[in-house]
Image: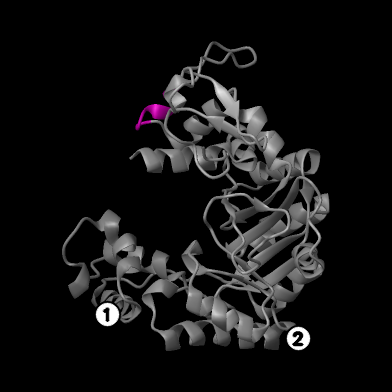
Amino acid sequence: MTALSDLWPPPTTGTPPGAATVTTDGQPIVTSPADLPPVLPPGGRALRSTATRTCSPPDARGEWLRFAPVQPLFRARAAQRLAVLAYHGVTDPRSFGAQLDRLRRLATPVSLASVQQAVTERRPLPARSVLVTFDDADRSVLTHALPALIERGIPAAAFVISELIGTEKPFWWHEADFLARHGGRARSLDCGHPSQLLRRLKAMPDPDRRRSLHELRVSADRRPPGQEQLTPADLLALRAGGVAIGNHTQGHPCLGRCDDATVRAEITGAHEALTRWLGDPPIAFAYPDGGHDVRAETVLQELGYRLGFLSDHRLGPRLPSHPLQISRLQVDSTTSTRRFDTILSGLEPAYRRWRGHAA
């Protein structure tokens, strides 16, 4: 059978509906969510497994999972795992603060340097270790996240796109969406629904993506509004406040769609810029779009990087076995407290993988 943190499998022969079992190594196993018994939340009526309904929004699913009988089993196992949270900015400072308060009560926040030290010394991190990270690092990391982190004494890491630093350029995916909604056209994007724009751009070989963006720019009726980005001075302020700065490439391409030379240029270009601004070379990298790339890992090793982060929505070991392939959990500042708990425990990620497996 498969361990909880890896998959929520379909029902197995001989397991009664609603039963949770454990393997010989103490890892809990759960059957189909449709077989879970109703749960009585505090002060509420019984909740049935609405998680199997495709119309249930993500937060509604998380609300139900919080009361699933297997949640305590997941939480117990998660105590012996490393949870790396991957945010993309902070749009709800109040909710983000509540999430940090929950981390202080239930977890052991650790810094990027602590993870590096654990890898170097081959010594596991403390139980319930959690590392907070931010990808893309828009200005909300400075204006909203940093004050909340400092107030609570929680360290973090921010992975930045170097070519945006000190500019008012929007993220390319925001720009593409704006241009397409204002008359922009590209030969490779003439067919299909506008809602599929980003997916189709990411699926293109990188030269085609860049060419399509150029065509959108020259054909659109309006230029997108500027988006104030972080400056080199802001990066220093973040670092002084306990937020380590890492590499997220020069322009955030999908590395799997790039040729070897582009992969190398994207990583080394950002590395050189960050070293110049910060005075020290970065030691951590977050893969754009979260997927591992073997060629990128080779470049990172050559440059002396110690840590690399995915966005695979998984917990990881407290002593990372593959330091350049560390798992992260996807979370948002608007995530409800109950759903936040199921993400931290690994239940919500396991449920999502079960849904994908079943499909």
In percent of width and height, residue 132 lies at: 69, 55
Q: Are marks 2 and 1 in contact (CB under 8 Å)?
A: no
Magenta range is 49-55
Q: Is residue 43 magenta?
A: no
In percent of width and height, residue 313 lies at: 54, 51
In percent of width and height, residue 98 lies at: 70, 40
Sequence order check, earlier mark of 2 and 1: 1
81 left or right of 212? right
Closer to the camera, 322 or 341? 322
Reply above or below: 36 against 247: above
Q: What amino acid does circle 2 point to? A: Gly
In percent of width and height, residue 46 lies at: 53, 12
Is residue 333 visible from the viewing direction of this image? yes
What sort of colour scheme is used for the picture?
Answer: one colour
- In the figure, residue 84 lies in which quadrant? bottom right
> The C terminus lies in which quarter of the figure?
top left
Q: Secondary structure at mark 2?
A: loop
Reply above or below: 69 against 222: above
On residue 67, which mark appears?
Answer: none
Residue holding disc 2: 279
Residue under the point 77% across and 43% down: 107
Residue holding disc 1: 218
Closer to the camera, 222 or 276? 276
* Of labels 2 and 1, the one closer to you: 2
Q: What amino acid does circle 1 point to? A: Val
Reply above or below: 179 against 274: above
Q: Secondary structure at mark 1?
A: helix
